[in-house]
Image: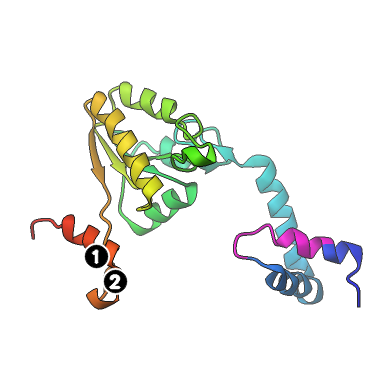
Amino acid sequence: MQNPGLLKELIQSLTCLPGVGAKSAQRMAFYLLQRNREGGRHLASILERAMAQIHHCRDCRTLTEHEVCEVCSDPLRDDGVLCVVETAADAWLLDQATRFRGKYFVLHGRLSPLDGIGPDQLGIAQLERRLAAGQVKEIILATNATLEGQATAHFIAEIASRHAVLSTRIAHGVPMGGELEFIDSSTLAHAFNGRQAF
């Protein structure tokens, strides 16, 4: 049986989501159409509103429906500590998982010259202006432990040092509950070399 045009279009549209292949998209489409049309209508409505109203925060570049996000406008947050992350999802996760009470700066990527991603695409000039203002005393580099993430962290640390801002890096290595025999050698070496006083 050939898929009708609109159904096929719905299935293909769902594959734009990360981790959703053709089979998963097909299951989602049939589920919504056969069992949860109201949920599908609500999802469509929310998606349309979100696409129209959510943009980047003026100060930290995270996603928000306001000019300045809730974190940046919170007077109880510490303006002197700034956590730099690669994505808005990273900031969201850190805020949920930690008791961090500072503010964030979202790069929306990491330095990758081969992909044409340089300082301009990451908002480095905006970050440097923020550091130059003198309010930030510590910058926490929470980029990923990839080669590009490490290079990005080093690049930002150099900028911070020019403005006399302390740079710290989140720890990487053996996860909580992890057993050494199951950890890959590069992660283990990184954890061993980055050991701290106990």
Residue of label 1: 188
Q: Is residue 172 magenta?
A: no
What secondary structure is found at the residue carrying circle 1?
Answer: helix
Do we see residue 45 in this rendering?
yes
First in sequence, mark 1 or 2: give its number: 2
Amino acid bearing label 1? Leu
The quadrant of the rendering that contains the C terminus is bottom left
Q: Seen from this angle, which residue lies furthest front?
A: 114
10 Å crowding of disc 1: few (<14), some (14-19), many (20+): some
Residue name at image x 90 percent, y 63 percent: 5
Where residue 125 appears, as percent x and y from the top left, is 43, 25
10 Å crowding of disc 2: few (<14), some (14-19), many (20+): some
Location of residue 163 with respect to 121 vertically, above or below: above
Residue of label 2: 183
Q: Is residue 13 magenta?
A: yes
Residue name at image x 46 percent, y 41 percent: 112
Locate residue 39 relative to residue 113 in the image: left or right.
Answer: right
- Residues in magenta? 9-19
Where residue 1 appears, as percent x and y from the top left, is 91, 78
